[in-house]
Amino acid sequence: MRTTPRTRAVSDTALFLGPAIVLLAIFFVAPILVNIVVAFTDMSQTLDFKDFPTTKQFNKLGKLDDEALLGIELRRSFYKALMLTLVFVVLTLGIFNLTFALILGLTTTALPDRMGAFFRAVWLLPRMSPSVVYALLWLWVVDSTERGLFNQILMAVGFEPMNLRLDHPMAVIVVANGLIGASLGMIIFTSAIRSIPEHLFHAARADGAGPFSIIRHVILPALRWPISYITIYQALALLVSFEYIFLIMGPARSTMTMAMLSYTKTLAPQIGGGQYAYGAAIAMILIVIGILVALAMWRLTNMKALLQRPRIEVR
């Protein structure tokens, strides 16, 4: 059978993407399907279930059932986790993953190459270090005793020690996640800024533009697509983030986001876990929220235009 160029192109694409598609199906699609199935059961620690399909787990978040007090408590914890997730994502994304990452990208590219590379390497160290080490450093920083780094600074300037984990828990997890999350945006923004043609900067300076005018009229328009990508990617990543929250704050109600609530209800029997079906139902709601957020941001940022074929062919 004679093969055409189009057939060969399709077979080459399948051969190239085949391993990635298989891994994606095994480690991403399959767990989602299993989670959906478990969410419509009454599975508990015994891994056994009698009812399928059932909406019992979702009813706990809706109308009152026979266990009225239990239903009220479950709904309170769920909606509080929903609001904390919104606050956590918006603050971390807006203040650190976008704004602070952009500032880092601008400042490190304005420095000499070696000095800029040094500062970028410093900001990448937390991301390259084990999560437990990073969390232990934060536990030392926010220690409520006089040994904590933050309290040492406060006492040095004449203030009383503070218990940040108790008094300002959301601030702790926002800053802790934001500082490590800003490194990704820093790298992408730095690469995008360096790809801007040099003659645009020379022309702007020749026209009398200052540093802020160059940032506004030259750099920021060129960063439209990187900013859109970071916004969508980091928003979805923060929705399901709970690793540093759990390591630094533990299962505290003051920082119980949706992802943390799903984890504690599922895999933490010492704090009321083992409710596999209920945890899967929360995770399923989180998946739906993530899909809606991704579609909304895709529409608002017009990411479709980024993936279109160029109108001219560059050789």
Image (spheres, rainbow, N blue to C red):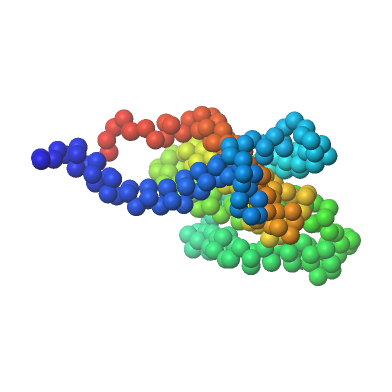
User: Which of the 4 image quadrants contains residue 150?
Assistant: bottom right
User: Which of the 4 image quadrants contains residue 180?
Assistant: bottom right
In the visual, does 83 lie left or right of 147?
A: left
Residue 271: image location, x then y, percent: 75, 56
Reply above or below: 71 against 242. above
Reply above or below: 308 against 267. above
Residue 100 visible at all: no
Residue 69: image location, x then y, percent: 83, 39
Q: Residue at x 27, y 35 (%)?
A: 313
Q: Relative to the observer, which residue lies in front, 156 or 175?
A: 175
Quarter of the rendering occupied by the C terminus: top left
Residue at the far front in the pictured view:
50
Residue 289 visible at all: yes
Q: Residue at x 78, y 50 (%)?
A: 253
Q: Relative to the observer, which residue lies in front, 247 or 35?
A: 35
In the visual, does 146 lie left or right of 176?
A: right
In the visual, does 1 lie left or right of 231?
A: left
Q: Residue at x 77, y 61 (%)?
A: 142
